[in-house]
Image (spheres, grey):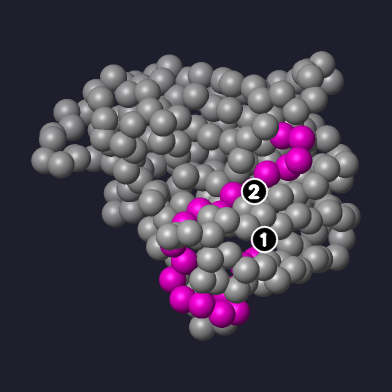
Amino acid sequence: MLYRSRLFPLTGYPLNVHGTVLARDSLDRQCVYLFRRDKDNCQLIRSKNDSLILTGPKIGLMIYDSIFFELDLKVTDVSGRKVKDERLSKGLMVVDGIFRLSFAPKHRVETEALVSMHSTLDLNYTFIRNAVEGTVEIRILEGPVHFHGNILARATNVPCDILLHDSKLSGVLTAGDNGVLQTARRVVGVSVDEMLLLTFVAAPVGVTTVEFTPRRNYYDEKKIICGNYKMLVKVTWSIAFFDVNF
């Protein structure tokens, strides 16, 4: 489970970051994008506390041997400041999944660092045993069509949140014609031995947490009220090669 990728540049902040972060497992070496932005859709990184907003994976990764992370990140001008070299971070990280899954303490968050080009990038992750895949759908039933706030996912025994949406970083979500909010990320991996907690923080006031029991198939849906919003939250469960969740 990849929780965050944080950049510590040599040139200072803020940064307009674009490029790719992708993962591959040893099963089929298929590219699974975790971060993918072009020059016209940069993410603004204001400080070392900001993480890259991950949008994947859209499919699961299996610990068959090792997990490979490939990074190619660049920067553009910020607030009139010229960037002499747009290369920010480029390289390969290899995580020995079999060793860590066999010997690492359960639920421990691991950290890998990539020093390259003009930055150091921290990659934080943990492995999930007996994992299933949950696809989250959020539909506004009553209230404003624009959602201001945060949407977070967490497994009960894992000490980190997965950010599904943050209005301050990604902008305000607008519901489609069917009322569904299109979050940047909607797929999470959870162990069948734990619970999935989804927390909604709606501006200006309103915090609601809803709990789902992981299944090997089927779906669950619950109605919640958070601030001025009444929403239907649906999680569709499936069996997946999802020993690593991002």
* Mark 2 in CB contact with mark 1 (< 8 angstroms): yes
Q: Quadrant of residue 65?
A: top right
For the record, the magenta segment spans 135-158
Total labels: the figure holds 2
Query: Residue 142, percent across and down?
Result: 56, 80
Front residue (pair 112, 13): 13
Q: Is residue 22 left or right of residue 109?
A: left
Disc 2 marks a residue whose amino acid type is: Ala
Magenta stretch: dominant secondary structure: strand
Q: Nearer the observer, disc 2 or disc 1? A: 2
Residue under numbered circle 1: 136
Magenta-drawn stretch contains 222: no
Vertical placement of residue 236 versus 29, above or below = below
Query: Residue 33, percent across and down?
Result: 55, 46
Residue under numbered circle 2: 153
Q: Quadrant of residue 178?
A: bottom right
Disc 1 marks a residue whose amino acid type is: Val
Q: Is residue 11 left or right of residue 241?
A: left
